[in-house]
Image (spheres, helix red, strand yellow):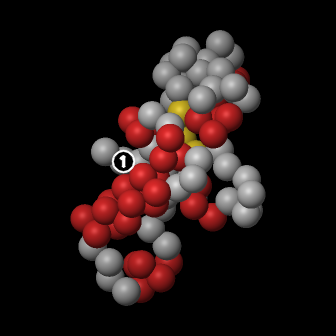
Amino acid sequence: MARELDPKGIRTIGVVTKIDIMDSGTNAKRMLEGKDVSLRLGFIGIKNRSQQDIIDRISVEAAIEKEQLYFSTHPVYSSMNQSVLGIF
């Protein structure tokens, strides 16, 4: 739908959700760096709260801390520009 409305990718920002549940050995680095699809505004990767976090009533603040910890310690994402990761 975005390609139909913004074929040149100048008004669209890409969001890669549930980045933490990708298959083992895979990552979204190429996508986040704009190497697979070019968008002027780029991409952002986020780690959603899990269903268990919701059931356990993990606060939004605690979920943000878990997301920051995930990205800052991940073998691939920790070396990337952190401004494209998470909901800072």
Q: Quadrant of residue 28?
A: top right
Q: Residue at x 31, y 62 (%)?
A: 65
Which quadrant does the N terminus fall into? Answer: top right
Q: Position of residue 43 (x, y in %)?
A: 54, 33
Left or right side of 22 for 58 = left
Q: Nearer the viewer, residue 54 or 69?
A: 69
Q: From the viewer's perspective, is residue 41 above or below residue 61? A: above
Q: Nearer the viewer, residue 26 or 13?
A: 26
Q: How many marks?
A: 1
Q: From the viewer's perspective, is residue 77 above or below residue 47? A: above
Q: Residue at x 69, y 26 (%)?
A: 35
Q: Position of residue 77 (x, y in %)?
A: 53, 46
Left or right side of 45 for 34 = right
- Disc 1 is placed on an element classified as loop
Q: Position of residue 15 (x, y in %)?
A: 54, 41
The residue beneath circle 1 is 87
Q: From the viewer's perspective, is residue 88 above or below residue 56? A: above
Q: From the viewer's perspective, is residue 78 above or below residue 69? A: above
Q: Quadrant of residue 32?
A: top right
Left or right side of 63 for 73 = right
